[in-house]
Amino acid sequence: MISWNDYQYVLTISRAGNIPSAAKQLKVNTSTVFRRLEKIETAYKLKLFERHRHGYIPTEAGQEIISAAERIEQEAFSAERALTGKDQKLTGRLRITSTESLAASFLSRHIPSFAEEYPGLYIEIISDNQRLSLTEREADIALRPTRPTEESLIGRKLSTLKWGIYGSTTHYQPYQIPDLKNLEGKSFIAWSGGPLAQQTTDWLRKNIPAVHIAYESSSMLTNAQLAINSRDLILLPCLTGQNWHGLVPVFSPLADVEGELWLVTHRDLQKNARVRALLDHLAKAAMGDRQLFQGEN
């Protein structure tokens, strides 16, 4: 009979695509994964993967095992969330994920006071532009610049997020540009990556006459530092730009560029004491930051 550990090995090999990567994820050596897969295939006289130069491809039998493993995994996640949701102790680990810019400009200013109020909690901030799964317990809470769409998640809108144009304090004075037309031919640093990044670049090309894109990076925080060390301008959320030492708002806020800030968790965790405490703390902090979100100070 296949054990849960066997299912887990097959599922991890499928997701990783090769044995070395699977071994790394499972935190075992490569030979252990080879032996375990060989043992499973021998026991059932079935080949679970086709070995190709570019990776391991599941056979029909392998896919059946993988599908079963995914169902078991989801049931395990569901059971864990159900138990965690009933936990009323204000102790233990609490994981919150957000983009790196939100972590730097919002969480970094408000998590210390929360940790001081609840010394029994260990807070882990996962600042990653990759969206982590709350369903699979990769994090307990997410701070996101978009409304949640998954039915299993619940969210609270904290604020709209205004954007502005920022430049180095060495070369610019606050609000020195009275009209976007005065930015004609100016050099900008572009943010690259996902759809939102592309929208900001499209906005620059549409609204700044003869705009010059000097260079780009996939990191908003890197872009902020690039702007500090150059004459180039940058488009940033006001929350980030207003908090970034060395930058000033040259033209802010922009009338037609804005997003939303959402605080999100899984429905099963909404009554967990640790989760509830942090949700309430950050919601209160956001109320105090409303002018920053709007670019009003």
Image: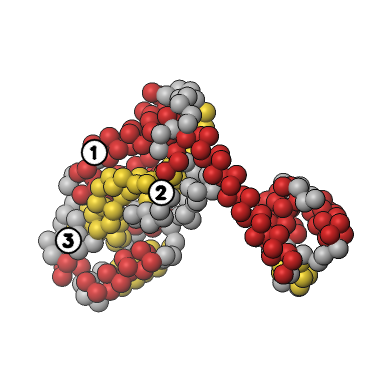
Along the line of sight, which residue is nearer the eye, 69 or 238?
69
Marks 1 and 2 sit apart, C-alpha to C-alpha, by 22 Å
Q: Residues within 10 Å of mark 2 (few under 14, many from 20)?
A: some
**Callout 3: SS:** loop
Q: Examine the image and state in which quarter residue 192 appears.
A: bottom left
Q: Is residue 149 left or right of residue 175?
A: right
Residue carrying label 1: 287
Amino acid type at mark 2: Leu
Percent position of residue 199, x then y: 32, 68
Amino acid type at mark 1: Met
Q: Earlier in the sequence, mark 2 or mark 3?
A: 2
Residue at the image point whose x is 21% and y is 75% from the top? 209
Marks 1 and 3 sit apart, C-alpha to C-alpha, by 21 Å
Residue at the image point whose x is 72% and y is 69% from the top? 60
Identify the residue at the far left of this view: 178
Q: Is residue 64 visible?
A: yes
Q: Earlier in the sequence, mark 1 or mark 2?
A: 2
Q: In the rendering, which numbered label is found on residue 153?
A: 2
Residue at the image point whose x is 75% and y is 59% from the top? 19
